[in-house]
Image (spheres, grey):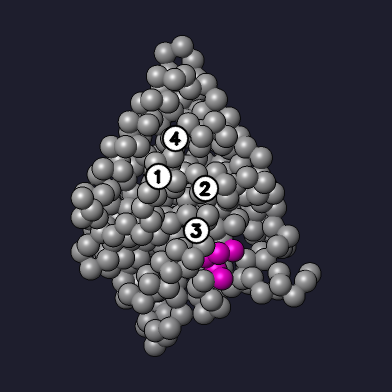
Amino acid sequence: MTKSTNAHYYAPGHSGCPGCGPSNCMIQVTDAIGKDAIIVNATGCIEINSSLYPNSAWRLPYIHVLFENTASVAAGVSAALKAKGNNHTKVVVTAGDGATYDIGFGAVSGMFERNDDVLYICYDNELYANTGVQRSGATPYGAATTTSFVGKEVRGKQTQKKPIVEIAAMHRIPYAASASIAYPQDLKMKIEKALKHEGAKFITVNSPCCLGAGFDGSISIKVARLAVQSRLWFLFEYENDEFKLNFNPEQKLPVKEYLSLQKRFAHLNEKEIALIQKQADLNYGRIKKLCGIK
Ligand SMILES: Cc1ncc(C[n+]2csc(CCOP(=O)(O)OP(=O)(O)O)c2C)c(N)n1
Ligand code: SF4
């Protein structure tokens, strides 16, 4: 092991696919958080890849919990620390989009409503990777998965992603944001900003899954960057009851370039691509309005 890899709190040697977006996300997130933290990790690819007994990629105190109670366990850990007079150790949830948007959502919402002092990080790879690529509430329109398959009538997922940042923000928590593994400085800034707040904080990080989306692991960062540049993923935040767009791609990149890199979109015809472009434009308009941009 080299000196540079020793520096990471999420260690190499885990069993993530080469080019795994979520694993990259864990390195960036834990490095930004630092050593005074406890990780509460929901079931999913990261949990399986990082903590196969007797090994662990975590150089931080770590607990794996079920989907249904990840946010609740984190809330309990936070309360216990405070009861012991420890007001400095950060409690951080790491969970996939299946855990966050869908299966554990009730507990997440409860944690937001109680304003528990926890930073919740969702690594959004837009599917259930660990169980064989099923669709989640974060899977985008048109994407093929094993449960949003492509046939004559149904051609991939027929609904759009849940607007999870807005949903989190509308609980009136102190901080909510959307980030990407392709924009490390923005992600680091958001983690540092979030941790300054007492209470519930939420950051969802676009972290593409090369295996599930069907592209070579060498272009994971390119795929993540194109998602932002083609306005299918936004870098924005909510703080002090206001939304702010952190990066506004001046030139609109057509969604086609992003879609064409991934097998999950290979079935799409021109009409369907045009519909996704229209959805992207509408979503961009909505986010701009939310962020007070004319
Ligand atoms: C209550 C419950 N439902 C379903 C499962 C099966 N399951 C295990 S991992 C997983 C996928 C989780 O997807 P996500 O949270 O997006 O994480 P990823 O695997 O993509 O990292 C599912 C459905 C489970 N363990 N518990
Ligand atoms: S299946 Fe996807 S999320 Fe899981 S390790 Fe591979 S690239 Fe990462």
**Residue found at x 47% / y 19%:** 269
Asked if the beta carbon under badge 3 is closer than 8 A to the nearest atom of ligand 2, the reply is no
| Amino acid type at image mark 4 | Val
Residue 174: image quadrant is bottom left
The reply to whether the C-beta atoms of the residues labelled 4 and 1 are less than 8 Å apart is no
**Residue found at x 42% / y 80%:** 81
Secondary structure type for disc 3? loop
| Amino acid type at image mark 2 | Ala
Give coordinates of residue 183: x percent, y percent: 49, 58
| Amino acid type at image mark 1 | Gln
Q: Residues within 10 Å of mark 2 (few under 14, many from 20)?
A: many
Q: Reading the chain from its start, which is encountered first: label 2 or label 4?
A: 2
Secondary structure type for disc 2? helix
Residue of label 2:
224
Q: Is residue 193 above or below residue 268?
A: below
Q: Reading the chain from its start, which is encountered first: label 4 or label 3?
A: 3
What whole-number distance in Å separates the C-alpha atoms at marks 2 and 3? 9 Å
What whole-number distance in Å separates the C-alpha atoms at marks 1 and 3? 17 Å
Of marks 2 and 4, the one in the foreground: 4
What whole-number distance in Å separates the C-alpha atoms at marks 4 and 1? 12 Å
Question: Label for residue 255?
Answer: 4
| Amino acid type at image mark 3 | Tyr
Q: Is residue 175 above or below residue 290?
A: below
With 240 as the anchor, is 222 left or right in this view?
right
What whole-number distance in Å separates the C-alpha atoms at marks 2 and 4? 13 Å
Residue of label 3:
183
Question: Label for residue 251?
Answer: 1
Residue 241: image quadrant is bottom left
